[in-house]
Amino acid sequence: MAFGSARPPGGRLPADVTSFIGREAELDALSGLLGRARLVTVLGPGGVGKTRLALRAAAQAAGNYAHGARCVELSDLRDPSLLPQAVADALGVAVQASRPPLGALTAYLAECELLLVLDTCEHLLDACAALTGPLLARSPGLTVLATSRQALDVPGEHVLPVPPLPLPAPDAAGDGDALTLLVQRAAAVAPGFALTDANRAQAAALCHRLDGLPLAIELAAVRLRALPLDRLPAQAGDTFALLGPGRSTSPARHRTLRAAVDWSYGLCTPAERLLWARLSVFAGPFGLTAADAVATDADLPAPALLTALVGLTEKSVVQRLDERRDRYRLPALLREYGAERLREREGREACRRRFVAHYRAQLVDFSAEFATPAQLARYRALAAERQNLYAALEYAAAVGGLQELTAVMWAYWLCAGQPAEATVWMTRALRERREPSQDRVMTLAWCSMFTGNQGDRAGASALAAEAVATADRLRDARASAWAALAASAARFHDGGPSHGPVLVRAAGTLMHQAGDRTGRRIAALHLSFAHLLAGQPAATLDTARTTLELLGEDGTKPVDQGSQGSQDDSTECYIHGSQLSTCGLAHLMLGAPAEAADALRRAVLLKGCLEDVLGVASATELLAWLAADEGRARRAARLFGATAALWRRVGPHPMVGNAQLQALHDAYERQARTALGARRFAALAAEGASLTLAQAVRYAAEDGRPASGTGRRALTARAAPASAALTRREREVAGLVAAGLSNRRIAERLVISKRTVDAHVEHILGKLGYASRAQITALLREEGAPGAGGEG
């Protein structure tokens, strides 16, 4: 890591002057490689900590070599022909005029058993390869450990890629080595600095903004002499200016973050530099097809792009995320640098337009196949592109083309269960242009329906009315059908059979006449819900059969209740899951709890496949009502807690605008709270609120009924303590967690690595089905385990 070592003369390994943070797994892997290979190259981008890792590994391994370990620092060497002389000088090998440096080195090393570290090879790749090959061939006791941003490509070379430091969790819980490094270095330069509950989120945000890159984190820590922590993440939009000069004792390439990246940029070919700049438009991971669509033009044709992409990957600029798939990533700091270079070039706007066009085409394809068995696979592919989709929205907004994207993005937002997010972007799009178009009608219609989902009935009605008026001006059958569907949805909650059902049925007829298959299926779903809100549960179930028949035309398969949400990619999930939720409530209103439970458990699984937060919340809410109705108050309390947490993620509770549904929610929640008592209800609801989305789906989908008719709930009755499922070591770790110790302190107490403790805690949470450390503490206190009452 930067600033970490004082460089001694004579090739001796430098002594550490700062603490070495983390890297246990990398050190173990490097030690294993040095034990079986004679040429090992530590690979990674500039500032990731290659040198520090290699030197630590060399120091640990030096005792395995009779002549120890030596280091040759190459960053200041510019003439490749001088490499043998530089290595000879570092090793103290005398070079005579009658004997060239390579010959002198070979003769010297032939008699040695030595670990030779060649640090910073990327600018001398050919020379390093030409040197190490002969030296290794003629010196059987020699092992070479190189650091480079690109492999040497010498026969027998083994490589170890070095990733950035592990980051803290998004909620800032736990530490992560990146956060530990920031805190330790900050405390060294800013006396009195300490990590607290008040500044932990800010420190974690800074580590994420800097991608866990050690050099960037160390430079940021230096800035804490002059700036408070809360200013650093805020100014990170200009990261290179913010993280200016470091210590003068650092290598020149590491004195500023820009110098480190300039070093990499200088090693690239013109085509690689052009591609680096163009790839900066991607805000997240991307595939080869996307890169080709966005970056290819006459200046960078497809064959040249592929060659350049390979080159950037080999130079540790672009990361390949999965060896089995073509998924790549440009790290945040390198993306920011590339964006600067793109601004300096012509063609920046053309590149962005190609980016928007590519993702619009993906959204068009998805909306066309939304209500088909291809839905799940296409949605998952789009969900993996979330960051790029939002970058496309920003680029489109900059040139006044936002409506073209929002008009086709409704299907993505619908599956993701994010009505509030959709409403923000659609409202923004509607302000940019007001002339009639199909894109405007679709944006108005879906903005109306998403607004209604959030309880704003007046806003939904106004948007729907404008959609109808705009469609009338266009005289377009498809636009008129979608506008009519939005208008009917805005009347859902008015009550009475003369409102919702009649209007939705008319909109469905228009969809049929327009030949819009997706619209027909959504209209059928809306019709069943309109009957439900009109107080017609039997008609709801009758209409639901039409919805499922329409889905079945494409061979859509129902969810397998025993699969726990692991559907294959030929399952339509959104409409099917929504229809099952509606049927569940209809069964509950008809006094058929078994049928209601069956429909709702299948619904939550389908919604879970999409990670549809709103859909999972809706089904889980109804399962909470059902549990309360059956007298299963503990399960009801947990489900109410899980549901409340999910509603908070998607915006206002959708029952706010419907008095009938709100009354049912209040009555069932009051029933469960009365049965348990306010304090116990709150504790169980908190347990439910702590569940992740996947855990909430799993808990809601499991019935939890007792195997016998004893009346005791299988969910709560245990023949043995839950902690009996833990191994001896896991129980020991659990006890220290309950005593309030952090993972790092537990590692110190048990004399094991923090990474091992992290794994134990993860296994404990998995075995117990818990989501937080607090639940471990509560369990051990309930069981009366020693040490569960605090550290003491």
Image: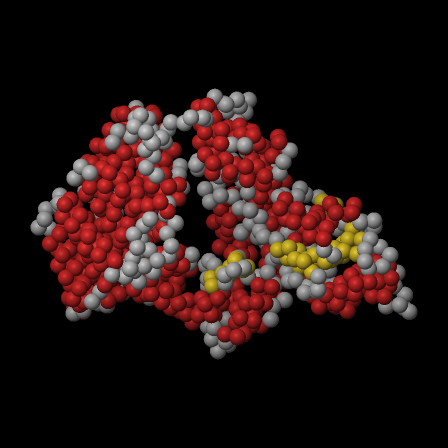
Badge count: 0
Q: Is residue 83 left or right of residue 50?
A: right
Measuring 30% from the left and 41% from the top, which residue is drawn there?
Answer: 620
Image spot of residue 276 (x, y percent): 53, 66
Q: Nearer the viewer, residue 88 or 680?
A: 680
Image spot of residue 481 (x, y percent): 18, 63
**Residue 410 in view in this figure:** no
How are the colours assigned in the image? secondary structure
Image spot of residue 457 (x, y percent): 19, 48
Name the residue at the bottom extreme.
Answer: 298
Name the residue at the left extreme.
Answer: 498
Measuring 45% from the left and 34% from the top, which residue is drawn there?
Answer: 768
Image spot of residue 88 (x, y percent): 82, 60
Q: Nearer the viewer, residue 111 or 495?
A: 111
The quarter of the picture where residue 636 lies is top left
Compared to residue 317, the image places residue 532 above or below, namely above
Q: Is residue 331 left or right of residue 115?
A: left
Q: Nearer the viewer, residue 455 or 429?
A: 455
Picture quarter with the C terminus? top right
Compared to residue 742, the image places residue 544 above or below, namely below
The quarter of the picture where residue 316 lies is bottom right
Measuring 64% from the left and 62% from the top, which residue is drawn there?
Answer: 150
The quarter of the picture where residue 505 lies is bottom left
